[in-house]
Amino acid sequence: TSDTVLAALESGVLKLTLNRPDKLNSFNEEMHVALRVQLERAHREDAIRAVLLTGAGRGFCAGQDLGNRDPRKGGPKPDLGHTLQTYYNPLLRLIRSLDKPVICAVNGVAAGAGANIAIACDIVLAARSAKFIQAFAKIGLIPDAGGSWSLTRILGEPRAKALTLTAEPLPAETAAEWGLIWKAVEDDALMNEATSLAEKLAAGPTLGLGLTKRLIQEAATNDLDSQLDRERDCQREAGLSEDYAEGVTAFLEKREAEFRGR
Ligand code: T3D
């Protein structure tokens, strides 16, 4: 275990806190491995029914730790394609393929890969003071961690290009107006609001929520005909779940449903 990611499981929510606050929670290899171990655990354990990702201190995540990329230290140039292949790409895939909601509470600045990891989460809440920065252009790199895909898809080319070519900070409120995140909330309300949302989702019909997440993601690349077929198949699967039976029973009995996640 590593203290670079703090993990706590409560009320079905696995809360993961990126914890290198002195470096604005930028990623070194140790933090990559620690986060991966926790996300793999979230894939495996039935008791985990939602994930809440946030950062310790005043920032959310400043992307790659550039201290580990100091050209002045000499030696061969690092193969950044290898880092993406080994760390960032698997991380993105773990978040997107998790059949449980991933909530991100962006507590402060999210830069470089840090911004794009946040955007990859299912529901993103950000503190009003937080900013999203596609910092890559400032150091001669390209938007990674899925950013070239997600920004273009969510915002369209004009805004995706302006953000990535200029590396100008995008305030949380504008990110919300543009539909890049779910909402911006007062700084001191962020963690309460994100936690209660995560707990609410963790108490939900996990199987149906997982299928919903998958369908919404697949819609990006499916045509309507294929998507209608997928809805048929997923609805069939959801209809066989215990939670569907409970949901309908609770409705007919005029009470709150008690979902068990299966
Ligand atoms: O390399 C590969 O494997 C390829 C993958 C690349 C993925 C990427 O993410 S590339 C992009 C890397 N990230 C950046 O370029 C962002 C660098 N950081 C910043 O531009 C600024 O820190 C922020 C705009 C995010 C925040 O600015 P500010 O003024 O609020 O804070 P600060 O003073 O710059 O940072 C506070 C401390 O965190 C500071 O340390 P110090 O001086 O107090 O000892 C700063 O050096 C450190 N820090 C911030 N970001 C990083 C970092 N240290 C290492 N790596 C960082 N990315």
Image (spheres, helix red, strand yellow):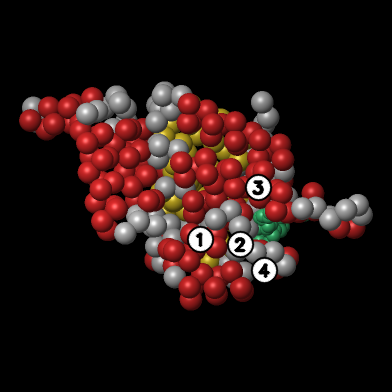
Mark 3 highlights which residue? 85
**Amino acid type, residue under disc 3 in the picture:** Gln
Q: What is the CA distance from the residue labelled 4 to the residue labelled 2? A: 8 Å
Q: Quadrant of residue 234?
A: top left
User: Would you say 91 lies left or right of 31 here?
Assistant: left
Q: Which mark is residue 143?
A: 2
Say whether mark 1 is within 8 Å of ligand 1. no
Mark 4 highlights which residue? 137
Q: Is residue 22 above or below residue 71?
A: above
Toward the viewer: 165 or 196?
165
The quadrant of the image that shows the C terminus is: top left
Q: Residue furthest right?
A: 74
Q: Residues within 10 Å of mark 1 (few under 14, many from 20)?
A: some
Which mark sits nearer the N-terminus, 3 or 1? 3
* Mark closer to the observer (3, 2): 3
Which mark sits nearer the N-terminus, 4 or 1? 4
**Is residue 198 at all visible to an observer of this figure?**
no
Q: What is the CA distance from the residue labelled 3 to the residue labelled 2? A: 14 Å
Q: Secondary structure at mark 3?
A: helix
Mark 1 highlights which residue? 149
